Amino acid sequence: KRPEIRCKVSQLLLDLMNICLDAEPQNRPTAKELTKELLQLLKDLRNYESKIYKQFKEIVDSGKYSNKVTSIRLNYQAQTSYLYESAFEL
C-alpha cells in the first residue's frame, strides 16, 4: 500500500507525486526526468498566468497552506518476492 498524500498541494504536484509512487517501478520517472519536471514547475511558479501558480495561489488564499514541516512516519510492507533495481541516472 502506498502512502496517502494528506496535505493540501496543487493538482500538478499531486499528479507528479502519484507517478513517483507508482507500484510499478518502470512507470516511475528517472531522477533526470523528475529533476527536469520539478525545475519546470519552479520556473512556471514565477509566471502569474501558469497553472501551477494559480493552483498554489488558490491554496494559499484558502488558508489551507502551511509552511511548517511535520514529521510523518511512513510504514511500508516489504515485498520480498521482488528485486528492484535503481533507475537513478543524471
Image: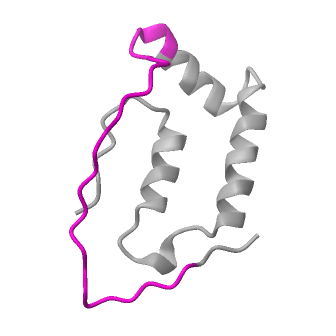
Quarter containing the N terminus: bottom left
Query: Toward which corner of the image does residue 39 lie, by quadrant?
Result: top right
Residue 9 in picture, x, y percent from top left: 45, 32
Give the extent of the magenta segment: 60-86
Q: Identify whether 79 is placed above or below 6.
A: below
User: Of 30 and 43, which appears nearest the observer?
Assistant: 30
Picture residue at 35% right of the left edge, 71% below the top: 23
Query: Toward which corner of the image does residue 71 lie, by quadrant?
Result: top left
Q: Quick check: 40 left or right of 12?
A: right
Quarter containing the C terminus: bottom right
Q: Quick check: 40 left or right of 71?
A: right
Query: Toward which corner of the image does residue 8 lie, by quadrant?
Result: top left
**68 part of magenta stretch:** yes
Q: How many marks on residues?
A: 0
User: Of 41 and 71, which appears nearest the observer?
Assistant: 71
Picture residue at 25% right of the left edge, 80% below the top: 79
Residue 4 in picture, x, y percent from top left: 28, 47
Q: Identify whether 32 is placed above or below 58.
A: below
Picture residue at 67% right of the left edge, 47% below the top: 38
